[in-house]
Image (cartoon, helix red, strand yellow):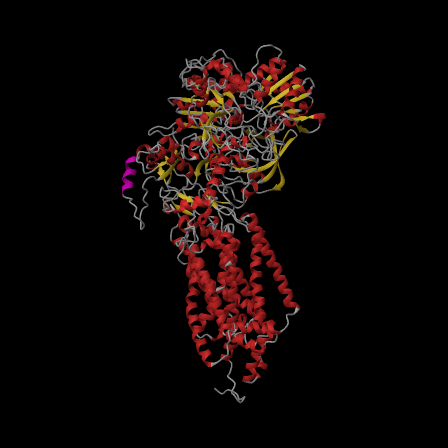
Amino acid sequence: MSDFASLSASEKYSHLNETVMNMINRKPGWGWWAIFIVDMMFLSFGIYCFIYQIYTGLGVAGYSHPVLWGVYITNFVFWVGIAHSGTLISAVLFLFRAKFRMSIYRIAEAMTVFAVATAGLFPIIHIGRPWNFYWLLPYPNQRGLWVNFDSPLLWDVFAVSTYATISSVFFFIGMIPDIAAIRDTVVGKAKKAFYSVASLGWKGSSWEWGHYTRAYFYFACFATPLVISVHSVVSWDFAMANTPGWHTSIFPPYFVAGAIFSGLAMVATLCIPLRYIFDLEDYITMDNFEGMSKMIILTSSIVFYAYLIEFFIAWYSGNKYEYDQFIYRAVGDYAVFYWIMMFCNGIVPHLLWFKKIRQNLVILFIITLLINVGMYFERFNIIVISLSKEFEPGSWGLYKPSWVEIGITVGSFAWFFMFFLIFIRTLPALSIAEIKEILPVPKKNGGENHE
Amino acid sequence: MKNEDKKSKTGTLNRRDFLKALSAIGGAAVISSGCTPEPLDKLVSYAVPPDDVIPGIANYYTSVIPCSPVGTPVIVRVREGRAIKVEGNPLDPVTSGSTSAEDQATLQTLYDPDRVKQPLFRNNRDNLTAITYVAAVDILVENLKNKPKNAYIITNNTTATTDKLFNELAEKIGAKRIKYEPFSYENIKHANKLTYGKNLLPTYHIDKADYLLSIGADFLETWLSPSEYSKRFTKMHEFDGDKKSFFCQVEPKMTMTGSMADEWVPVKPFTNLALVLGIINYIKSNKLNKKPIPNVFEDLETYSLSRTSSITGINEESIIKIAKSFVSAPSAMAIGGGYANSSKDDYKTIVAINLLNEITGNSDKLDFDNYLQLSNCSKTSEITDFIDDASKGNVDFVFIYNANPVYSLPKSFNVKKAFEKIKFKVSGSMLDDETSELCDLVIPDLHAFEKWGDYEGKVGNYYIMQPVMKPLYKGSSIEQTLLNSLNRITDSEDEKISSYYAYLRNEWKKFNLGDSPFPIFWNKIVKDGGIYNNNQKYSSLSFNGDLKIKSSTFKSNTDKLNLYITPSYKFYDGRSSNNSWLQELPDLLTTAVWDSWVEINSKLAEKLDIKEGDFLEIESDGKTIVTQAYLTPAIRPDTISISMGQGHTKMGRYAQNRGVNPIDLLSTDLDSESGGLDLSSAQVTIKKTGNWEKFVKVQHSFSQENRDMVQVIPMEKLLHDDHHDDHHGEHHKEYDMYREYDYFIHKWGMTVDLDKCTGCGSCVVSCYAENNIPVVGKEQVANGRHMAWLTLERFQEEINDELNGTTRIDMRILPQMCQHCENAPCEPVCPVFATYHNPEGINLMVYSRCVGTRYCSNNCSYKVRRFNWFSYQWPEPLNLQLNPDVTVRAKGVMEKCNFCFHKIGIAKDKAKDEKRKMNYEEISTITACQTACGCGAIEFGDLNDPNAKVTKLSKDKRAYSLLGELNTRPTVTYLKKIRREQI
């Protein structure tokens, strides 16, 4: 830090370029390869599980009447939630001119795109006849069949695909100047060709910059409503159903807050080790973590409030089914998971009120991991506990994930990290152009900036 | 013009012609396979196609299932040469067109993959090897010609012409004839002989009673004629506007029959005699009798209330209540069960019951003119004599047909060892069961649907057994085999009838009393299914007042537990166990499938630290069995109960090595007077083995959780409170944001009368047969993947019976199928319109459109949807039973009840072709559940028709919708169960 601070402005500029180039140019060491190979092994096992499930039938999953949605939908909601904060950090905070976003937004955006790519798999893995998944798309066909626009699942199709499109485009647009910078310095024909194509002929002229910043602004405006919409729509999958424990109007804000909460935690989970491995202390600073921590406290409070108000409404509404459901959540068969969720999402994040804890990255890392676990169980609790005890007492039953479901879930994490591992070695993980905005501008003759 | 020119010009086969040709070939293929169930290799069209086979249109043939105890005349639906569904024959006065679950499942016996496919012979004492039928008959004839010394012919309850043939054979070779039925009710017969001089099993007109006292008779399950008594019980017990009869069941453990009782009294096992004598003594001492009391029981006076109470474990007030109600009812009736009254000397209980009926003037409901042919069965003592004989090595030859004594007699008889000493053993059974396995020659019989024959259930009711399809396997019926053998060992020069069909017709000539020529008479009775005895008159009885009996001594209380063995309403004595539909039909009281269990009182279990699913070792006199515990409050704490039917060591893939056979715990004790097996001989101790496994049952929670699933209405309210209810209804007009559905032609709906439903499960099996529902096996049921579209959910409320210091349960049964809601929660959530509301009010499921999101099931408030987790298999030839009108669902799609939509279509087409409206007979036979229901609990029809029965019932005072407050507006309406506390 002190070294970096003592550098001159122009040296700081080149240091940044070198840091980013170093992440891409440095030959992957054994550590990276070891992680990547282990990751691919998990991914292969996940793919094997999926093929086995298609071949044998969904019965190899642990579904048990009446719980016909389980870990797959939990994973779907979890990954969509993770995908949330990328757009939040890049678009919403961009519009609010929150400077702490600049060094982490690229990682957050990458996380968003990869998380959506993971989430998108789960509806297909989940359905009984995955080879017919395209029947959910409204396209003109010779069979004269159409889709049911009343169904929240169809809204999901649109919400998630829109979100995937916009977040990928936004991710890519933001990278163009940086890719151009890499193109200019990278060695090797193939690499050169790749970055040349990917930079879309960026020259860095002021005319280009003018258009670029305006386009980026528009995309940010366009993406901002999606932050609200995508998880609201996902929450309607549940809120629109009549199932006790699902059928509540609090779900959209509760889900959005939860998604931001889990997304921020995931960004922190990813940034802390990255910062350590690639010596990014100069760019991903404690201020970034401060900002994230404070937002985590805010969203955690919203989520915790929602947990409590659900109980209140279950009692206040006088709805017997709802009431029984919430008592069951707290003391029933799955109570362990319920209290894990309460502890991880409601209690643990409030440690961050203390500055010492915020500043200790090891504790922060553990807290964010716990938040990820808690948010996973939040979705599991909503889906599984509600379904296992519905209206009809004669049908009640319990669900336990099978090894196939666990295999596919682990595989989905491997799938996500595979993208991430490739990303940090090939694309600029820090936004060179934007970080330079917050660095002091070097004078032409090498003098210091006395702004 | 132009097209035709073009066609004639080219003269080649174009696409349309090709398709036409293709369909013609396809049609020919279907027709040519018309009469045989096996698919053919070559596609050769008929020179003359059979008149009665139109591909795609079902044929209906009458036949009879010769099952115990009285047989069931049926109408079999046949498609393209395959029997696919069984319905009761409504012409029959005994069953009146109802079928039991076992009857419905007979199709799986017909297509049983483990049937013996061709004769087997044990050469050189090796394994049984397949031989040809001709060779098998040769071997049989050779052995018969040798005039075996000391031969036996053992069959089940064969009747009519089949019985005649067996008797002829027995006479020819000098064999002793035994008709062995595990339930032959020796006690009842013996008691009737003593009291009325009739060694018979009568018909009990329970429908004429206002108060029915059943001393352990499971008349809705296995006792004498369950289909008939279900009908009679319904007639008696249904609410007819101002009256409803009262039913009191006395038994140690709640059975399905007991669960229907208005009053259920847990009695100590095998102390029924004391109870009945206590009641009689009370009547006598209070001079409540209507007729003089003959002094039959010398020690009647000793049965004071206190002594009776201490023997039977029933509180004095309960006894007084029963006695008073019995006497005060205008028409009462007491009946006594078979196995409940089968300890030593328990025929005396039946004598006492007869006496009770006699002194209260109620013996007019006993009908000995319409007795059961089961009365002619042998006593158990006769078969045990045979076993004694055989174990001494004195028996040379035995012919066994449909009897399985190796399984159904206690192990202590050593039947297996005795059998091995017999020189030559022939079996005629279809299945390779425990007894057939030991035989030297097996000539398998054909199923009743593959052969000609006849059956007489109750005297005078002769049913024709008509082959409805060609035999699945080469071979002949047992009757044909007998006839062939008889012809060959008879030396007479007379003309012999070589075909059993001709023989049968010859036999039936005696029934042609009218003027019509025999062929016309024959065609009529084959069409009707037989000759029915509609005579309802019967002669009155005279009680043998000179009878002198001393009551027995009762076992004193010991530390050991009583073992109460109950027959199974699914498997009877275990003969139907190799049947996957019945194995997967959840037992009504436990909802257990595919296994055995031992029922233990919850409080006793708590004391012994036994949990549900613990494996218990049950020991009696050195004999042990191990099975899982099931806890229930509805059993006496001094008793444990195990159901019969499981524990086969051989029989087929579904039956063998599954569960335990409680009979094995019994000793060789017989009742010397009546000759029946003593079922009370085992006093058991139980011990935990330490093993535990999840007890596999379909329903996990029996509590209603205060959700009023099965609603009850007190009878008093029904009688007096009607005005208020009507008034109440008018104020509740419903308003809805959405437009009502227009049902232009039909609006199909259903009502289920919860007061009538007995939970026999016949509708469930019928639904399996009609709708190609897959059987998933025990492991998948444990995973919650039971596929039944119609389930009998059962709920219970525990009621502390302070009088008797026990807990009894208020059993409520809820037959639940898709409710076909008007505001169906499943419909809007399907993203691909795979489920939708059709214009006739049915919530339909389009299997081919379903992608399997399972959102519909999540959103279904009733949880009636079933998902295809796997591609389910029907082992050959069970696949031949599949109904071609119903899709066999692929893996990954949702399915559920659709009101037998395909049959609505068939009925509509027929009416349309005949340019008329559908009539009641057609509509009321559409759904498989309604046709199978013997109690008339299910009614299906058009709610658009104001005069339809279903419309009227759905507006009944008792009508309610399941979870009505959710505003799903189901078209299935339930009628509340009626609660009667007072008589």
**In the image: residue B956, left or right of residue A78:** left
Q: Residue furthest right?
A: B124
Q: Quadrant of the C terminus of chain B?
A: top left
Q: Is residue B660 above or below residue A337?
A: above
Quarter of the image for residue A213 reads bottom left
Quarter of the image for residue A250 reads bottom left
x then y, percent, for residue B594: 56, 37
**In the image: residue A149, left or right of residue B403:** left
Is residue B728 highlighted in magenta?
yes
**In the image: residue A316, left or right of residue A20:** left
In this rendered view, identify the residue nearer to me: B125 or B683: B125
Could one spot residue B446 in this view of the protein? yes
| Bounds of the magenta segment | B722-730
Q: Is residue B257 above or below residue A357?
A: above
In this rendered view, identify the residue nearer to me: A336 or A86: A86
x then y, percent, for residue A36: 62, 64
Q: Quadrant of the N terminus of chain B?
A: top left
Is residue B584 highlighted in magenta?
no
**In the image: residue B179, left or right of residue B725:** right
In this rendered view, identify the residue nearer to me: A149 or B282: A149
x then y, percent, for residue B192: 50, 16
Q: Secondary structure of the magenta portion, mostly? A: helix
Could one spot residue B673 in this view of the protein? no
Quarter of the image for residue B722 reads top left
Q: Is residue A352 above or below residue A379?
A: below
Residue at point 44%, 65% (across, down): A227
x then y, percent, for residue A243: 43, 50
Q: Is residue A352 above or below residue B34?
A: below
